[in-house]
Image: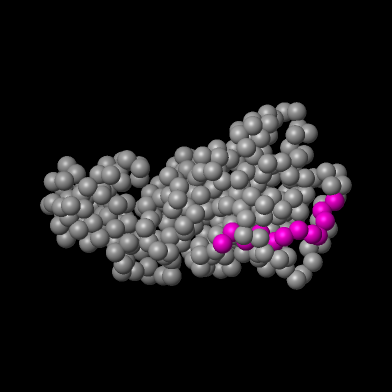
C-alpha cells in the first residue's frame, strides 16, 4: 500500500481534494492554495482542520470530506515505492523547474535517479507513423542511447512507442511522460510497454491519481516532456500532430528542436518550414543529431569506447550515418 507519510504526499492529497471540490485546474488553484498556507497547515490532513479549510475556500465541509476521502483512497492505489516530488524539492529535475510548465507535483514510478541526469532528448511524432518513420525512430533512439543520452517520449502509439521499445531493446535508459495518472495504462496496447518502463526506466505523470483523465491532459504533458529534455526531435508528424504542440513548448522554453531533412519531402505538410523559421535545426543523419547537440549545448566529452554502427541508408535521412563525432553530455 502507498503510504501518505511525507509532507509532499499529504499536500498532494489536499491539493487534489481542492481541485475536485472547486473543479479547478492546477494553474488556477495554485495561488489560492498557497495563500491558504498563511491560515492552515497545507501539509497536514485537511480533515484535521476541515472547518477552517471550509471557511477559506467557501466549500461545504461535507463536500470537502467526501472529496478528501476519495482522493486519499485513490492515492493509496499507487504502488508502495511510487514517489511524489513537489516543485522546489532538491530532487525535482532542474531543467523542468526552469520552465513555466513545471507542475506543482510529479508522480514517479520506476528509477527516479534518471531525473538527476540532464542528458535527455525527446523523440516525438505521429501516432499513425509510416514504417520508415518507425524505423528511423528506432535507429535514432539506439544512437542516442549509445551516446549516453536518455530517450524521453510520451508512450503514445506510433513514434513514441517505437522510441521507448528501441531504447529498452538495446539496454538503454528511457523516460515516459504520460498523459494519465500512474494508475492508468493508455493506450491499452502499450500496457506491457509501460510496465516494462516502470521496471527498467521511469514513468512520470503530473496528474493526481484522483483526477479523471481529460483530453487536454495530453497536450499539457507535452510541456512537461519538453521541459525535461535538452532538445526535441520531431521524427515524423502530420499537420495536427501533438508533436507540434511539443515543438511550440520547446520553442517557448528555448530548447532545441530538430527536424529530419526528409520531412521537407512531404508536400502535404507546412510545419517543417514554419519551425525552421522559428529556429529549428534540420538534420540528415543520427551523427548530425549528436554533433548538433554537442555544438549547441556544449560540455563535449570523448566518444564512448564502443563504435556506433552505420544505421541509415542513403535514401532515409539523406546520407549514410558515419560513426564519428563527440558524445553529448548535458551535465
Give how far across and how far down residue 222 sits, in percent: 52, 45
Foreground pick, 194 / 139: 139
Give how far across and how far down residue 299 sits, in percent: 62, 60
Main secondary-structure element of the magenta-colored stretch = loop
Give how far across and how far down residue 80 sits, in percent: 41, 70
Q: Residue furthest right?
A: 314
- Along the horizontal axis of the image, is 166 left or right of 24? right
- 202 lies above or below 133: below
Q: Quadrant of the N terminus?
A: bottom left
Query: Residue 308 occupies which quadrant of the picture?
Result: bottom right
- 161 lies above or below 109: above
Magenta residues span: 320-331
Foreground pick, 235 / 157: 235
* Residue 327 painted magenta: yes
Foreground pick, 226 / 195: 226
- Along the horizontal axis of the image, is 279 left or right of 263? left
Give how far across and how far down residue 16 sits, in percent: 32, 51
Residue 304 in view (yes/no): yes
- Along the horizontal axis of the image, is 226 left or right of 82? right
Residue for point 15% across, 52% down: 39
Q: Quadrant of the C terminus?
A: bottom right
Residue for point 84% across, 47% down: 319
Amino acid at each position: 500500500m502507498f503510504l501518505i507519510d511525507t509532507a509532499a504526499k499529504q499536500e498532494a492529497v489536499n491539493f487534489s481534494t481542492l481541485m475536485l471540490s472547486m473543479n479547478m485546474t492546477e494553474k488556477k488553484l495554485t495561488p489560492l492554495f498557497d495563500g491558504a498556507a498563511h491560515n492552515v497547515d497545507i501539509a497536514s490532513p485537511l480533515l484535521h482542520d476541515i472547518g477552517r479549510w471550509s471557511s477559506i475556500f467557501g466549500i461545504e465541509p461535507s463536500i470537502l470530506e467526501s472529496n478528501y476521502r476519495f482522493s486519499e483512497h485513490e492515492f493509496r492505489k499507487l504502488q508502495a515505492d511510487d514517489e511524489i516530488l513537489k516543485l522546489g524539492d532538491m530532487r525535482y529535475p532542474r531543467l523542468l523547474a526552469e520552465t513555466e510548465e513545471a507542475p506543482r507535483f510529479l508522480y514517479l514510478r520506476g528509477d527516479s535517479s534518471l531525473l538527476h541526469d540532464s542528458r535527455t532528448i525527446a523523440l516525438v511524432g505521429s501516432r499513425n507513423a509510416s514504417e520508415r518513420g518507425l524505423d528511423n525512430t528506432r535507429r535514432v533512439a539506439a544512437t542516442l542511447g549509445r551516446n549516453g543520452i536518455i530517450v524521453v517520449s510520451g508512450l503514445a502509439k506510433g513514434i513514441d512507442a517505437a522510441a521507448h521499445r528501441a531504447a529498452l531493446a538495446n539496454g538503454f535508459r528511457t523516460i515516459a511522460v504520460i498523459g494519465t495518472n500512474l494508475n492508468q495504462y493508455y493506450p491499452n496496447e502499450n500496457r506491457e510497454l509501460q510496465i516494462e518502463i516502470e521496471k527498467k526506466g521511469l514513468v512520470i505523470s503530473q496528474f493526481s491519481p484522483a483526477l479523471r483523465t481529460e483530453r487536454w491532459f495530453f497536450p499539457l504533458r507535452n510541456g512537461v516532456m519538453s521541459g525535461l529534455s535538452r532538445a526535441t526531435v520531431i521524427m515524423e508528424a502530420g499537420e495536427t500532430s501533438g508533436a507540434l504542440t511539443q515543438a511550440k513548448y520547446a520553442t517557448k522554453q528555448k530548447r532545441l528542436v530538430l527536424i529530419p531533412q526528409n520531412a521537407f519531402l512531404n508536400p502535404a505538410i507546412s510545419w517543417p518550414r514554419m519551425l525552421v523559421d522559428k529556429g529549428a535545426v534540420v538534420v540528415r543523419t543520427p551523427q548530425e543529431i549528436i554533433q548538433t547537440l554537442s555544438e549547441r549545448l556544449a560540455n563535449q566529452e570523448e566518444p564512448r569506447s564502443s563504435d556506433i554502427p552505420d544505421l541509415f541508408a542513403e535514401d532515409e535521412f539523406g546520407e549514410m550515418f558515419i560513426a564519428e563525432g563527440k558524445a553529448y553530455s548535458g551535465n
